[in-house]
Amino acid sequence: MGPLLCLLSAVCFGAMSIFGKFAYDAGVSPSALLLVRFVLAAVVLAALLRLWPSRPERRPPGRAVAVALGLGAVGFATQATLYFEALSVMDASLLSLILYTYPLMVTAGAVLLRRDRMTRGRAIALAVASAGTVLVLAGAGGGALNPLGVALGFGSALTYTIYILVSDRIVHDMPPLRLATLVMTGAAAALTAKALLTGGVELTFRPAGWFWVAGIAIVSTVLATLLFFAGLRRTGPSTAAILSTVEPFVTAALAALTLGEFLAPAQLAGGLLLLASVVVVQMRPERVVEPVPVA
């Protein structure tokens, strides 16, 4: 069941960009999408935290709670904002591949912070990932590559990398569901404050927009996260990380079926190189930096 749960989680995460595109078509702005997504996800997770049967747990340290809220308010809210702003100006499949440079960034960051060591296999994987990224970007023809979208996409990947490296310091201080709830609450609070300071967000979009945003919150946030955690407990972090590499392919397949978006051959080859390098990095980790999968 463990691998199946991880794959189902990847499918749920992979559908997020498609839901986002349909939400934009229904008149939803990126700021409205983010606000509704995180508020709804925080409410659902808080309800699950209250109702979920579990053994008594020690109270998490106050510092860990503050860091978790900060991860949501600063890290995850920023990462999601950059991602959905990029999605508004570029193809979902291409953005998914750009975002998936983050596992290699995490590896490089862990080495620089001396939480991990550089091995020959990892060095080769980073070189292959760099070549794959070049192919992904160079393969866009006919002006299809939006420079702003690419910059936002890489900014989202870099922000998520920092988010993961920081979350690694507190991931063992509290249960996953509690941590995810605090992160979502922090993100919802930050985006609510931003909306109040900037004059609010427009929520009078068509009913279809509410449906697609709810899909992002329930399917691609709450359900995807819980499925991943359940799979992680049964397979271990390395196997779960390898299985999660199907996510960009899910996005690309759904984008082709529903949006008519297709990757160029060079981009597809680059994506294969990029994801193969992620698998190589995860095959024999000396130390695994575990993400909090709420992206």
Image (tube, rainbow, N blue to C red):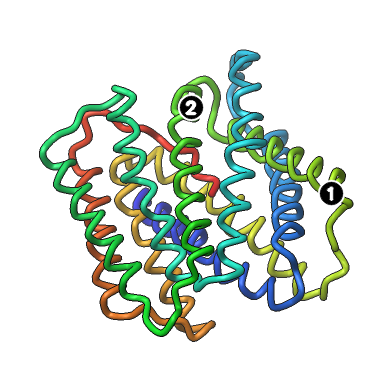
Q: Real-space Cα distance between discs 1 and 2?
A: 33 Å
Task: Write the residue at 55% across / 23% down.
Answer: 174
Q: Is residue 178 left or right of residue 32?
A: left
Q: In this view, does 199 lie to the left or right of 236?
A: right
Which comes sooner in the sequence, label 1 or label 2?
2
Q: What's the amino acid at mark 1?
A: Thr
Task: Write the residue at 79% across / 44% down.
Answer: 194
Q: Is residue 205 above or below residue 32?
A: below
Image quadrant in which you'd find residue 269: bottom left
Task: Say the numbered circle drawn on residue 198.
Answer: 1
Q: Is residue 253 left or right of residue 268?
A: right
Q: What element carries label 1?
A: loop
Q: Is residue 73 above or below residue 117?
A: below
Q: Which of 295 and 74 is in front in this view?
A: 74
Task: Say the numbered circle drawn on residue 11.
Answer: none
> Which residue is labeled 2 in the image?
171
Residue 162 appears at what percent x and percent y? 47, 36
Q: For the image shown, how many numbered marks are present on the structure?
A: 2
Image quadrant in which you'd find residue 17: bottom right
Q: What's the amino acid at mark 2?
A: Val
Q: In this view, does 20 lie above or below 241?
A: below
Determine crowd level at label 1: few under 14, some 14-19, many 20+ residues with C-alpha closer than 10 A.
few
Q: Comparing marks 1 and 2, which lies closer to the viewer?
A: 1
Determine crowd level at label 2: few under 14, some 14-19, many 20+ residues with C-alpha closer than 10 A.
some
Residue 152 appears at what percent x and percent y? 53, 56
